Amino acid sequence: MKAEQALQKSFAISSGNFDGERAQVWLLLGKHEFAAALEQATMLNQRMLDDVMIYVFLTDANIVKLLPHARKIVLKVGDSQTVQLYFRHAAELNAPESTAAQRIHGE
């Protein structure tokens, strides 16, 4: 994968660079490697507490655990547009890998 090769080059130039490590978490999420993404995002969050993108990654990495809770919210709230969007996002993350990759990359 080109993105992974680019990351390896960036780490060779500057090991431990925050932006590269953040991109690596994004790639892990794209491959549905949620446990590894959660572990790396948690470590990055400890280094940079105010990075909004890391909080998004933490949410996505935890989404598999949160699906039962999301379903309960949808049932309680009904047709709230915000809840529906959240639930749709959770469903996309749990879609078969090829479908999720297509949605993530706009293919």
Image (cartoon, rainbow, N blue to C red):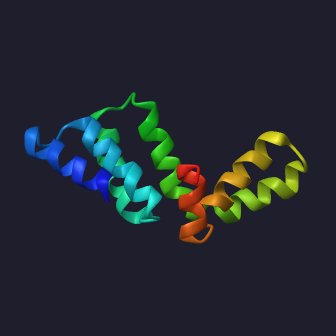
Specify the quadrant that holds the N terminus: bottom left
Q: How many marks?
A: 0
* Residue 28 shown left or right of residue 81 in the figure: left
Q: Is residue 21 above or below residue 90?
A: above
Query: Percent x, y for residue 75?
Result: 86, 58
Residue 22 in view here: yes
* Residue 57 shown left or right of residue 76 in the figure: left
Judge by depth and name the residue closer to the eye, 25 or 2. Answer: 2
Q: Residue furthest front?
A: 107
Residue at horizontal 46 percent and vertical 31 percent from the top: 52
Q: Residue furthest bottom?
A: 96
Q: Quadrant of residue 31?
A: bottom left
Residue 42 in view here: no
Q: Quadrant of residue 69?
A: bottom right
Residue at horizontal 29 percent and vertical 47 percent from the top: 43
Residue at horizontal 68 percent and vertical 61 percent from the top: 91
Residue at horizontal 23 percent and vertical 48 percent from the top: 7
Q: Is residue 78 above or below residue 56?
A: below
Query: Percent x, y for residue 100?
Result: 58, 61
Judge by depth and name the residue closer to the eye, 83 or 2. Answer: 2
Specify the quadrant that holds the C terminus: bottom right
Judge by depth and name the residue closer to the eye, 31 or 70. Answer: 31
Q: Quadrant of residue 98?
A: bottom right
Judge by depth and name the residue closer to the eye, 94 or 107. Answer: 107
Q: Residue furthest right?
A: 78
Query: Percent x, y for residue 35?
Result: 40, 64
